Amino acid sequence: MNKLIRTFRDIFSIEDLRERILNTLLFLAVYRLGSYIVLPGVDGARFQGSTEGIFGLLDTLLGGAFSNASIFGLSIMPYISASIVLQLLTVAVPYFQKLQQEGESGRKKINQYTRVLTIVICLFQSAAYIASNIPTEYIYPEYMVDFAGVSLFSISSIIVLTSGTIFCMWMGEKITDRGIGNGISLLIMVGIISRFPGAIIKESMTRGMGGAMLFILELVALFFIVMCVVMITQAVRQIPIQYAKQIVGNKVYGGQRQYLPIKVNSAGVMPIIFAQSLMLIPAFFTNMLASSGNEFLMKFIYAFSDYTSWQYSLMFGMLIIIFTFFYTAIAINPNQIADDMKRNNGFIPGVKPGPQTSDHIATVIDRITLPGAIFLAIIAILPSIASRFGVSRDFAQFFGGTSLLIMVGVILDTLQQVESYLLMKHYEGLMKSGKFNETTEAITAA
């Protein structure tokens, strides 16, 4: 306990880290506040949006903003969809490939394209959101005035939802720049955590005194699942690297043996977020296609809108595996790693420098990415399995799946950034003491 208190004291003793944490908490508080501000024209006292199927899962990811018909009803989901499209273009289109290779300037241009595409996607998704999730009986009559066949409510809501998404996107970027952790991921995580206490209370009340033992078993199972997620998230495959000795003057440099750490889950939570964004597409068209009368089409749409169906689980798992390989290929470049090793006189024992080193690293990445991707897919479909065993849907969404993976991944990533600041503080303290400090003072006095 004393060590924990001392760690918190060290965290808040670092001025830069303290400001970043406070900035992050402020932005997250603004985001949660906006999740309860209802769209203009909606009777918030009577309105209750859909929380069934995929809409319920989306509502969990957005912390209730979806079912509340709030100004942040779409949150940063359009931005994630735009990021998916741009990352696909960087693989398929030479122009975007060139931008990606231009370094910082190219990244800024890609980010600008992503923002513009986010607005376009948000315009379409907000129209679908209004049509599928907000019945007219919950809208005040004065907002149903038509302008060229379109109601005032639809026009104003599309503008407000698009502006809310842009504001969420801006907050996510500011958290990344001036806060701690990845801003976009933190916005999703805080929405998930906000629903977690209520889900546990609801599950315990549903079980009652007679089902207390079953509820305890569910918590124990959840604990072991969390441990497995942490283990696979932190798992690393170390590739040994030997650096050749160099003689410079009378000194010998190099000759060290180090390791190249490659995570089993190098893609983090991004494959889950990407796959989830694509799986939301059928749900937005459910109500709009209800009047089409095509029974086969409606069964198809409903099957992929219900996260407990085997069709949804199969497609969701396949998308996660595909995006895991895709995002890992983007995040880790074996050719660049091999070139850097060759430039620094490093080599993998038993492997020739150059193309063979690149092929060896790529093979290792492929071998460890496959089990990691399968594990992510299994964890992602656990909520549907838990629901079939009688666990309530609210609690089942935290029993595994997207919610748990995002929470664990984002929390670990944020803690690692905090740890890096603590290490920097430790190194700074070493430099300000001992012989180094005495030498500096002597030079200054001279």
Image: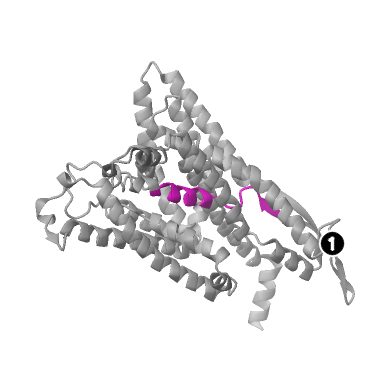
Instruction: Residue at 57% x, 53% y: name it.
Output: 416
Q: Is residue 302 left or right of residue 133?
A: right
Taking 113 as reference, is 377 above or below it? Answer: above
Q: Badge 1 is on which residue?
A: 352
| 6 left or right of 43 in image | right
First to last magenta residue range: 259-281
Q: x%, y% of residue 59?
A: 35, 44
Res. 402 visible in picture: yes
Q: Residue shown at 84%/58% (left/top)? A: 351
Instruction: Please rate how many residues cluster around mark 1, counting C-alpha atoms within 10 Å: few if below 14, some from 14 to 19, many from 20.
Output: few
Q: Is residue 306 magenta?
A: no
Q: Residue type at mark 1? A: Lys
In front: 427, or 296?
296
Q: Position of residue 276 (x, y in %)?
A: 45, 47
Q: Secondary structure at mark 1?
A: loop
Q: How many marks?
A: 1
- Give the image quarter of residue 359: bottom right
Question: Where does the image place residue 208, in percent across and percent down from the top left?
Answer: 36, 20
Residue extending furthest toward the left: 142
In the image as oriented, which residue stretches furthest toward the top?
Answer: 210
Residue at 58% across, 52% down: 267
How far across and how far down the image is residue 446, in percent?
67, 84
